Amino acid sequence: MTRVLSGIVMAAGALATIVFLPAMGIRLVAALVAAVAAFEYMALIGVDDPSSRGAYAVVAGLTTWQVSSTGAPGMVAVLAFLVAGLNAVVVTRGTGQQAILGAFSMLYIGMPLGLLAALNIGRHGWRATVLLIATVVVSDSMQFYTGRTFGRHPLAPAISPKKTVEGAIGGAIAGTLFMALAGPIVFPEHSPMLLAVLGFVMVLLGILGDLFESRLKREANVKDSSSLIPGHGGVLDRIDALLFVIPAFVIAAGVVQ
């Protein structure tokens, strides 16, 4: 019951944010989400110092803020190298590997959430954002129910034992069909077939994003990225698939605009 109630609250809050907040509010919320997710991510890669985790959280939030303003992520890569280098030289309590992985949070978390905010503020507005998120939710839900009903063959047993090939197939079919049917409402200038291809790519990327975070948690020997959201774990647990999907969808949205 706790999971269901918190899920309803999250969904309602997210929808209200996407539809009703002005551009500045959208950018601020996206930056805050990025900061929290980056703070959780830093714990997963073994950074225990709260100040270091907080610093990277701020950098990820600022990345989201900047990308959401310009819609151009090109400078993020340059800044990521700069942050990694400075951290490796100045902060000696962590390892060089942690410095690089910490800088990666700008690409992994900051940039996609900035692009998501830019998408919401852009030409197609909240409808494109809702389409993106709904496709991922439909795919994830069908993966769960299909895997639970028909799952026999593990998809990635060393990373996420509960995920099955059958579940992935069910999610791929559902996400592809959903994008083919709902996509023309937002992008009427494109054929359902082309949007179906986009939906299929989105599902594959979403599965990879989920497995990527699952690997981080397995290596950190934790079940969730945090306990911030009752019944759901952390913020990163809720957006892991989206982080991989957003850039591809935004690139496609840029093509159809």
Image (cartoon, helix red, strand yellow):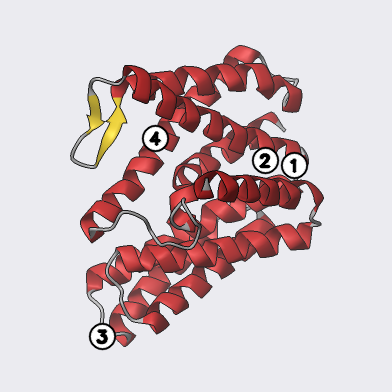
In this figure, which residue is indicated by the disc labeled 4? Answer: 207
- Which three-letter amino acid code belongs to the residue tagged 1? Trp
In this figure, which residue is indicated by the disc labeled 3? Answer: 92
Whole-Å distance between the Cαs marked 3 and 2? 41 Å
Q: Are marks 3 and 2 in contact (CB under 8 Å)?
A: no
| Quadrant position of residue 211 | top left
Looking at the picture, tell me which residue is in the foreground, 100 or 109. Answer: 109
- Which three-letter amino acid code belongs to the residue tagged 2? Thr
- The numbered dot on residue 129 is 2
- Which three-letter amino acid code belongs to the residue tagged 4? Ile
Mark 3 lies on a secondary structure that is loop
Residue 185 appears at what percent x and percent y? 75, 23
Looking at the picture, tell me which residue is in the foreground, 7 or 122. Answer: 7
Between circles 3 and 2, the one closer to the viewer is: 2
Whole-Å distance between the Cαs marked 4 and 1? 24 Å
Look at the picture and state if 1 lies above or below 143.
below
Mark 4 lies on a secondary structure that is helix
Q: Are marks 4 and 1 in contact (CB under 8 Å)?
A: no
Q: Earlier in the sequence, mark 1 or mark 3?
A: 3
Between circles 1 and 3, the one closer to the viewer is: 1
Left or right: 215, with 10 as reference point: left
Neighbours of disc 3 within 10 Å: few (<14), some (14-19), many (20+): few
Q: Earlier in the sequence, mark 4 or mark 1?
A: 1
